[in-house]
Image: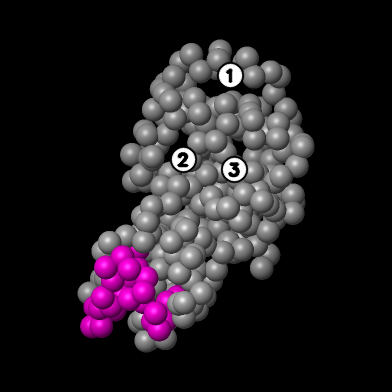
Amino acid sequence: MRAIYVQKSANGPNAGRRLLLATFANLFGSFSAWSASLGPPSPRELRVVGTGFKKIFELSNEGVFYGMGVEVVQIIGAQLGYKVRFEIFPWARALRLVQLGQADILIGPYRSAERMFSMAFSQQPFFEDQLAFYSRVQKIINWRGDYSDLVGRRIVVLNGWTYGNEFEMARPDLLINTANTVEGALTMLLHQRADLLAANRRDTDPIIAALGIQRKVVALSPLIGINLAFLAYPRSARHDLIRGEFDSVLNYMSKNGVLKKLGNRYGVTVP
């Protein structure tokens, strides 16, 4: 699939650099003086990739990227003097670009032992997701948190997603099918090609509402788990500097409540 990329626009949802800097300056007037201690800004452009994550990384019909992840990267990049170019891909492709060092930053991956071998993660997560099983209302599956109850059940998961240690340990005993999009996974569930869908609620609940299928699909309790989401970078010496710089600002944003304010604005849970 061809990448879609645009430069930041002065218009569009949360996309203007001047608006971002003004907002940040109003929150913390002393931040510019602090960030100056990080050293002179770099003119290098950063290639930032991801896939369509609701409220985190989205592309408007006008070709403008928006969402909490977009704004976080724009704020940090502006403070450090980096230009930022966003591109959107299917998730597995976006992961691969960072693993191969062909992109500089990946927005929103969950951390796992396997991924830590191929990518470096930010010190600070910037949001968290609730992971849940979804079932058809007409045939609700008994889920009590015990994966032995799901042996023989057909479960659809999203390509490239990770679901936590317990799920991954149980995976060999489960009947797993893979979909490339949440919409595709919901279609499989509704058409009885799967008994359960495993997905995060932030992405899935708005799509269920948009499709008008709230009375056909239900999220089960208890949760599969809660995953923390990070910025990720290639494992290379030249990206260690970028990661260190971004960590300094991201940690500051967490400590001083900027991440919480952004999370409240976007309706995203910040750990």
- Report x, y in % for residue 102: 74, 51
Q: Quadrant of residue 221?
A: bottom left
Viewer-proximal residue among 270 and 51: 270
Separation of marks 3 and 1 at Cα, in angstroms: 21 Å
Residue located beneath label 2 in the image: 126
Query: Are there few (<14), some (14-19), or many (20+) residues within 10 Å of tag 2?
Result: many
Report the residue at 62% width, 49% height from top.
116
Say what secondary structure mark 3 lies in: strand
Quadrant (top left/top right/bottom left/bottom right) for the N terminus: bottom right
Report the residue at 46% width, 58% height from top.
164
Residue located beneath label 3 in the image: 121
Which contiguous range is marked in magenta?
132-157
Q: Is residue 70 left or right of residue 130?
A: right
Amino acid on which the number 2 mark rests in the picture: Phe
Q: Is residue 161 left or right of residue 36?
A: left
Q: Earlier in the sequence, mark 1 or mark 2?
A: 1
